[in-house]
Image (tube, rainbow, N blue to C red):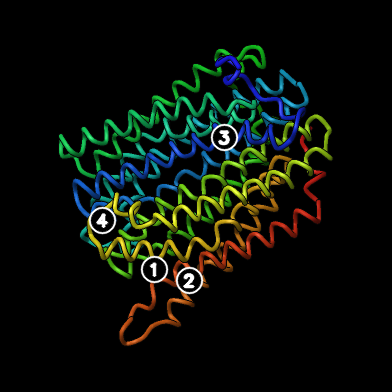
Amino acid sequence: MKISKLFEPVDMTTGNPVRQILVFTIPMLLGNIAQQLYNTVDSIIVGRFVGDNALAAVGSAGPIFNLMLVLFIGISVGATIMVSQYLGARNREALSRSIGCCITLTVIASAVIMVVGSLLSYPLLKLLNTPDTIIYWCRDYLIILCLGCVGSGLYNILSGVLRGLGDSVSALIYLLIATVINIVLDYCFVAYLGLGVAGVALATIIAQMVSSVLCIRKLMHMEQLFDFGKEYLKPEKTFSASLIRLGLPSGITQAILSMSMIVVQSLTNSFGEQFIAANVIVMRIDGFVMLPAFSFGTAMTTYAGQNIGAGQMDRVTKGAREGTLVAMGISAVLTGVILLFGRSIMGIFTETQELISLSYKMMQILGVGYIMMEVTQCLSGIMRGAGDTITPMWISIANSIIIRVPLAYLLVNLTKTPELPQGDCAMMYVSLVLTWTIGALLTLFFYRIGRWKGKSIV
């Protein structure tokens, strides 16, 4: 196979469903690994060169910044659905205008986050009872990320457009380039220049800007599929409305998830700096183990979108079944690897043995629930690709608000004793596994009902 073939869009309406899903998923999985390296390298470098409190600061700032990114997430999901369905229907004009609309709305969303995020960072940290020892590091980290969010926003949305077009390889290459830049700059800014937490934030926004410029350059050279020019950047009402209708539920979902994480972060902060740092380590490793679920989920969205656009519903259901089983198998293998070598992996972040032991204990609890996440992400991806973004939204909201947050506080409070006045911190992770399991069962139930089959925009 010629190397150039890897950079061509994948037509998922023909060929073996599992093979096409895997061909599309593998580059995206590698890209998601590279994306996860952004945060992981940040954590490793500040943990090694600044200390455990700096590690805790980077982690505490994460849920707040994720909340600020919900506009991008909504636009990205809407873009993938619109682009994949218009591509499947071979509608060049609609495809061109929908892509231009995505770019314009991304720039507008970036401007909003730059202003609002910078102003709200410190008040939110105070509201969450962030320890005084790390609050100013958290504030600096958040403000820098908000001011440079245009690069992150454009990369996330434009890589969503590329995925909708069936091209997951280009986004991977650009992200790998940005990851290398991020790692080099992290080391230079922190180890040599002594910029601390602010240094890793600067490295991140510079690297993301590079990846966004590369994505724009790629789209400008895909004239065989659509037209790319300033006349298509006008956010026309029809395409803006479709983008918002398709993307808003996912944006709301992520907002609810982020807010629930912020509420839970307040509970996490009550256990002190060591547990906060342990939670950062666990979440960084958890991010890697969850990548197959997220990658297959996104691949299923493109797969369903293209095939529904082409009127091939039988092919959609076959791919959903086979793709989910493959994803579950991959997740089971990864979970086993993490549990076997977990202590060594956690030792990369810190040399503090108590912190390594605490992190490994929490990781063992989470290991039970990863296969459930594969079911949720894959079947939700199919429903979103069909145009039904509402059902996954309600499932996520119910899980986050009605189940996860109350359950976490309930289990922690039930385990309070004279020896553990704050409760058992392990209950934070037990509640998470229970939430994942319930979410998978709800997703499977609504997928089988099949109302998503009549939601196509084409």
Question: Could you say which quadrant of the image residue 423 lies in?
Answer: bottom left
SS of the residue under disc 2: helix
Q: How far apart are marks 1 and 3 (CA)?
A: 37 Å
Q: Nearer the viewer, mark 1 or mark 4?
A: 1
Nearest-to-viewer mark from 2 and 3:
3
- Residue denoted by label 4: 135
Q: Which of marks 3 and 4 is in front?
A: 3
> CB under 8 Å between callouts 1 and 3?
no
In this view of the protein, which residue sits in the foreground, 361 or 337? Answer: 337
- Sequence-wise, the earlier of marks 4 and 2 is 4
Q: Distance between the residues labelled 2 and 3?
A: 35 Å
211 left or right of 454 in image = left
Give the residue type that dot 3 points to: Ile
Q: Which residue is drawn at 84% across and 33% down?
A: 311
Residue labelled with disc 2: 408
What amino acid does circle 1 point to? Answer: Leu
Q: Mark 3 points at which residue?
A: 26
Q: Earlier in the sequence, mark 1 or mark 4?
A: 4
Q: Name the residue under label 1.
A: 267
- What secondary structure is marked by label 4? helix
Question: Quick check: marks 2 and 1 in contact, CB under 8 Å?
Answer: yes
Residue at 79% x, 55% y: name it: 448
| Apparent side of residue 59 relative to residue 236 in the rendered image (left or right) | left
Residue 194 position, x and y percent, is 15, 39
Q: Earlier in the sequence, mark 1 or mark 3?
A: 3
**Residue at the location (61% across, 44% down)?**
248
